[in-house]
Structures are given as structure tokens and as C-alpha cells.
Amino acid sequence: MKRRSRPIPGMPLPLNNLGVIQLREHHHATARRHFEKAIRLKPDYVDPYYNLACLFAIENQPKESLQYLKKAVSLHPSAGTWACEDSDLRTLKDLPEFKRTVGLEP
């Protein structure tokens, strides 16, 4: 049996997981493509939005990061709790918009 070297089309969970692996390996462009494809396949799947928020925070792009974080929280409110505990988002934690997004401020 030949192993597949590419993700099976139409499967957002494996695409998101591949994105996480690529993000941890500092292959940000590839990670972003995986997350974006997962979103196209399943627009209500919270994880790739959240992971794009992490990616953009790591890349010091707070505006883009907060945009994806807001979407993640709108899909799954507990994403705000995840964000408060996630070291990938540490560069955002003092921003008023971050605090509003995760529910720390009205």
C-alpha cells in the first residue's frame, strides 16, 4: 500500500492538524494554507480560525490575529478561555480589543 503524502481532500480536521504541525515547525505559509482550506471546507469549524489567530500573533500581526480570534469566539465562546491561556497569543493580552474579545472587559 502506498502512503499518501497529501491530505485527503474534503477533510477539514486533518488539514487543521497538518496546519498545527506546520505552525510548530515554523512553516507559516504552509500552515496558513492548510487552515484556510479547512475553513473553506467547513466554515463553522472553530479550530482553524483560532489557529490562524495564533499564527498571526506569532507573526506580530495583531489586527489579523484579532480578526480570526473574534470569529473563533463567535463560533465557540470557550475559545476566549483558550486564548487567555495560550502562550501563542501573549503579544495580544494587554490590548483592550483582546480583552473585549475574550470577555475580560465589556
Image (cartoon, rainbow, N blue to C red):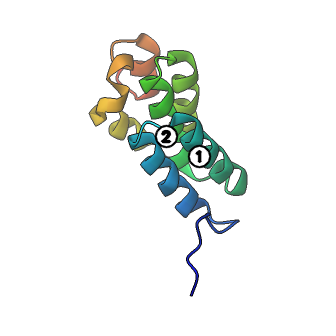
Q: Are marks 2 and 1 in contact (CB under 8 Å)?
A: no
Three-letter amino acid code at disc 1? Answer: Phe
Locate the C terminus by quadrant: top left
Task: Name the image quarter holding residue 8.
Answer: bottom right
Query: Would residue 31 appear left or right of 102 to someone viewing this image?
Result: right
> Which residue is pictured at 70% across the width and 66% down the height?
9
Is 99 situated above or below 34? above
Three-letter amino acid code at disc 2? Answer: Tyr
Q: Position of residue 54 (x, y in %)?
A: 44, 33
Residue 38 visible? The answer is yes
Locate the N terminus by quadrant: bottom right
Pointer 2 local density, CA inside 10 Å: few below 14, some 14–19, many at least 20:
many
Q: Position of residue 53 (x, y in %)?
A: 50, 32
Pointer 1 local density, CA inside 10 Å: few below 14, some 14–19, many at least 20:
many
Name the disc covering residue 35, or none: 1
Q: Nearer the viewer, residue 49 or 73?
A: 49
Q: CA distance from mark 2 to mark 1?
A: 9 Å
Please name the residue that numbered disc 2 is placed on.
Answer: 50
Task: Name the image quarter holding residue 92.
Answer: top left
Is 28 situated above or below 63? below
Residue 75 visible? The answer is no
Is 94 situated above or below 13? above
- Label 2 vs 1, first from the N-terminus: 1
> Which residue is pictured at 50% across the width and 17% down the height?
62
Is 4 situated above or below 20? below
Q: Position of residue 70 (x, y in %)?
A: 54, 31
> Which residue is pictured at 52% across the width and 24% down the height?
66
Q: Nearer the viewer, residue 34 or 106?
A: 34
At mark 2, the secondary structure is helix
